[in-house]
Image (cartoon, grey):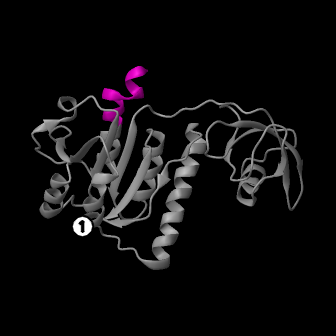
Amino acid sequence: MNSPRFFCDRPLGPGARLDLPEAVARHAVRVLRLPPGAMITLFDGRGGEYPATLESISKDRVAVSVGPWDPVERESALALTLVQAIQAADKMDYTIQKAVELGISAIQPVASRRSVVKLSGERQQKRESHWQSVAISACEQCGRNQVPQVAPVRPLDAWLAESGQTQPGLRLMLAPGAAHSLEQLGPASQVTLLIGAEGGLEPGEMAAAAQAGFIPVRLGPRILRTETAGLAALAAIQTLWGDFKGE
């Protein structure tokens, strides 16, 4: 994991020779200033990774030769899904980046009644594409070879109505003053965590979530911001039932 890591959406295989995608090549040469002969690591999101060598660098292309496949994985044994109400400014980027580092399996952005940001049409598509890029970059940094999916934005009420058939396992939502703590509810191998936007979930949304099987849980006596709450809960879940405990 010492060599720079890059996601490459082109066919990878031992002995292959290929040109890096433009964005990857630009980052490797112009940002990191890697010279010919430098070693890098490539992964395509389908599992495992490949050592590769920069063979040649020119104005228009960066050619690499690919080494043997390494099946190494750094995934969590816990299947974790974060259902995150859309946050304002760069909070959503931060949440996605850190959730990937914490081992999240999938991220479902939802539009809640208290979401400050309202997305639709082309603007929504651009944000969804950007968030997936944030997840890819986080995988490059933290060593993961499987990229979590950032799903298209859904209205929270609609997602809750449909999630019973698609989200098995323990369902949790953070609620100050809730009767249960995380430790009282585990252990679990599949967890779906629902986090509200600024101002939290409205009472009606919490009621709908409870009807969909979400259990209110507390994280101590303090009220956490939306960009803190989900990440703190994910770290606690990994500590109680996941790969933090193994460490």
Image position of 182 with respect to 114: above or below: above
- In this figure, which residue is indicated by the disc labeled 1? 114
Residue drawn at the location 58% of the way across and 36% of the way down? 143
Amino acid at the residue labelled 1:
Arg
**Where's residue 218, x and y in %?**
17, 41
Q: Quadrant of the C terminus?
A: top left
Residue drawn at the location 34% of the way across and 38% of the way down? 190
**Where's residue 49, x and y in %?**
68, 37
The magenta stretch spans which residues?
A: 235-247
Image position of 170 with respect to 197: above or below: above
For residue 86, say whether it is visible: no
Q: Does residue 87 appear left or right of residue 123 in this picture? A: left
Query: Does residue 108 belong to the magenta stretch?
Result: no
Helix, strand or loop: magenta stretch: helix
Residue drawn at the location 49% of the way across and 52% of the way down? 149
Question: Which one is nearer the viewer's eye here, 7 or 232?
Answer: 7
**Where's residue 107, x and y in %?**
41, 52
**Where's residue 1, x and y in %?**
65, 31
Residue drawn at the location 53% of the way across and 64% of the way down? 129
For residue 90, say whether it is visible: yes
